[in-house]
Amino acid sequence: MDEARARQVLAAAGVLPGAGDARLLALGENAVFAAGDLVVKVGRDAELLERASRELDIALWLAEAGVPAVRAAEPEPLLVDGHPVTVWHRLPDAVRPAEPRDLAALLRIVHALPAPSFALPRRELLGGVERWLRLAGDAIDPADAAYLRERRDGFASAAAALTPHLPPGPIHGDALPRNVHVGPDGPVLVDLETFSGDLREHDLVVMALSRDRYGLPAEAYDAFTAAYGWDVREWEGCAVLRGARETASCAWVAQHAPSNPKALAEFRRRVASLRDGDATVRWYPF
């Protein structure tokens, strides 16, 4: 789904006043548009409808629990021309960029929550790999796709056998500073669609990988672990969850390869570093 298609769906949905002048905030599995006091997310395809519906349920649950998080403006998703559409209250402008320590403080709140009244899915970190590789199609080397499928299967089995250090329960599922918005009232969580019920360590490995692969300064990572109260790298299962996330991250980039040469180059960089077993190769956010 490109921006033009997403704007067609946005116009057809009729949920955003001034849709023609809406600002595109992000374009990935969802196209995210803002106008006035609202934000609208347009999903890539109908397969994401169930996830969109669950994200709205999660937003309501977090609101009832008093967790600082984005709030839904409409309780149910729409399906418009085969695309799920959800409507959200727009947050005030950020007063500063989110930092890892802001994320850690929010994760402490989330990780203290009991399970909601509805079922949260497991964090199927590797569940999207096949879909993303399918979307990549012939743009990527079939041998690379086969390699990632093999890694996926191996890490899925290893992850299922892990003994956690923390009690399992609700997690954000994609715990990065980019999913925190620091407004005038403080940090709030955004992008709730990956909320899950699983190992709390999933949320912490993300930042460990950011330190090792994406150039997060050591002092920023140390501030994150100090604010949370524990460093997941002390846990013997850390390498398994890290490997699973690296595999998923490679496949996620692959879906953009057919239309974006930079995505293809980044995909090749990531796969080559995994094949070589070189954990020092820098990856670049995409």
Image (cartoon, rainbow, N blue to C red):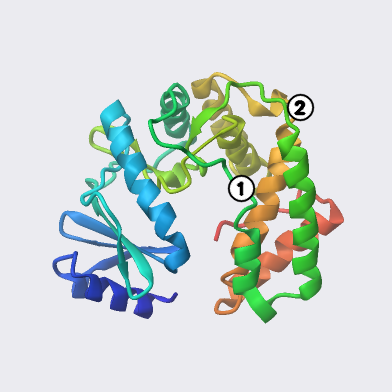
**Foreground label between 1 and 2:** 1
Residue of label 2: 236
Q: Secondary structure at mark 1?
A: loop
Disc 1 residue type (three-letter):
Leu
Query: Is 113 left or right of 226, judged from the image as shown?
Result: left
Residue 144 visible to the viewer: yes
Residue of label 1: 125
Query: Is 175 left or right of 239, judged from the image as shown?
Result: left
Disc 2 residue type (three-letter):
Glu
Percent x, y of residue 49 = 40, 60
The residue located at (69%, 39%) in the rendering is: 241
Query: Is 251 left or right of 40, judged from the image as shown?
Result: right
The residue located at (51%, 44%) in the rendering is: 174
In the foreground, 62 or 78: 78
Quadrant of the image containing the C terminus: bottom right
Quadrant for residue 143, please give it.
bottom right
In the foreground, 103 or 19: 19
Quadrant for residue 10, please give it.
bottom left
